[in-house]
Image: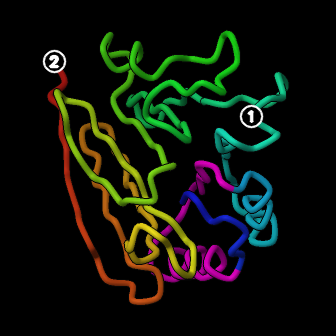
């Protein structure tokens, strides 16, 4: 999930919808707003979060602005933006470098409020969209579900409230 911007009702709806429909191992919040992700604790779910680029948390050296995590042998970048930002701190991983050097298999990002599922040069890009009641970019609220297995990743964008699948993608890799 990303870009909840304080809409805790929308965030709760996304959480409960996922928990009703899927076995959920981990929730990820990709910023805007960092503290919104604390709601996962009400559900006793494991979660990861990164701050949005304009958040005060983004300037705290003790809080990672970007995370690199491995799931089922796939390397994921968790970031509010898919590219570097002027508010990055020295030492923040640069998404462009990770992508061009093929150090990541999946980039999970937010920021644009526009849902995205795209495979580009073997790297999967996922933007779950936003969870705002109304958004100036005209996109309906949505979230993403990403299923990860050793040789397959399935991503889906789900409309908040409707529960309808807006987009889906599968990527596989061969193991030699």
Residue that appears at 44% across and 52% down: 112
Q: Position of residue 80 (x, y in %)?
A: 55, 41
- Quadrant assignment, res 156: bottom left
Q: Nearer the viewer, residue 21 or 56?
A: 56
Task: Report the side of 68 relative to 33 (left or right).
Answer: left
Residue that appears at 31% across and 56% down: 155
Q: Which residue bears the numbered disc 2?
A: 176
- Vertical placement of 22 versus 80: above or below? below
- Vertical placement of 161 versus 18: above or below? below
Q: Residue furthest front?
A: 136
Q: Position of residue 6 (x, y in %)?
A: 73, 69
Kindly state the secondary structure of the residue where label 2 is placed.
Answer: loop
- Point out the frontmost of discs 2 and 1: 1
Q: Position of residue 123 (x, y in %)?
A: 26, 31
Q: Nearer the viewer, residue 96 or 41?
A: 96
Q: Nearer the viewer, residue 109 or 135?
A: 135
Residue that appears at 30% across and 14% down: 100
Mark 2 surroundings: few (<14), some (14-19) or many (≥20) residues within 10 A: few
Magenta stretch?
A: 9-32
Q: Position of residue 159 (x, y in %)?
A: 39, 78
Q: Which residue bears the numbered disc 1?
A: 58
């Amino acid at each position: 999930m990303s870009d909840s911007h304080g809409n805790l009702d929308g965030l709760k709806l996304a959480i409960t919808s996922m928990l009703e429909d899927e076995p959920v191992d981990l929730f990820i919040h990709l910023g805007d707003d960092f503290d919104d992700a604390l709601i996962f604790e009400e559900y006793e779910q494991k979660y990861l979060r990164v701050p949005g680029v304009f958040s005060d948390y983004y300037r705290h050296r003790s809080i990672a602005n970007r995370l690199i995590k491995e799931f089922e042998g796939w390397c994921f970048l968790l970031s509010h933006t898919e590219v570097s930002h002027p508010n990055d701190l020295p030492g923040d991983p640069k998404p462009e470098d990770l992508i061009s050097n093929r150090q990541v298999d999946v980039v999970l990002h937010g920021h644009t409020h526009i849902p995205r599922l795209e495979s580009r040069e073997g790297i999967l890009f996922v933007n779950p969209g936003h969870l705002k009641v109304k958004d100036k970019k005209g996109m309906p609220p949505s979230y993403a579900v990403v299923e990860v297995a050793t040789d397959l990743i399935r991503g889906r964008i789900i409309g908040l409230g409707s529960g309808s699948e807006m987009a889906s993608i599968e990527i596989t890799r061969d193991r030699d």
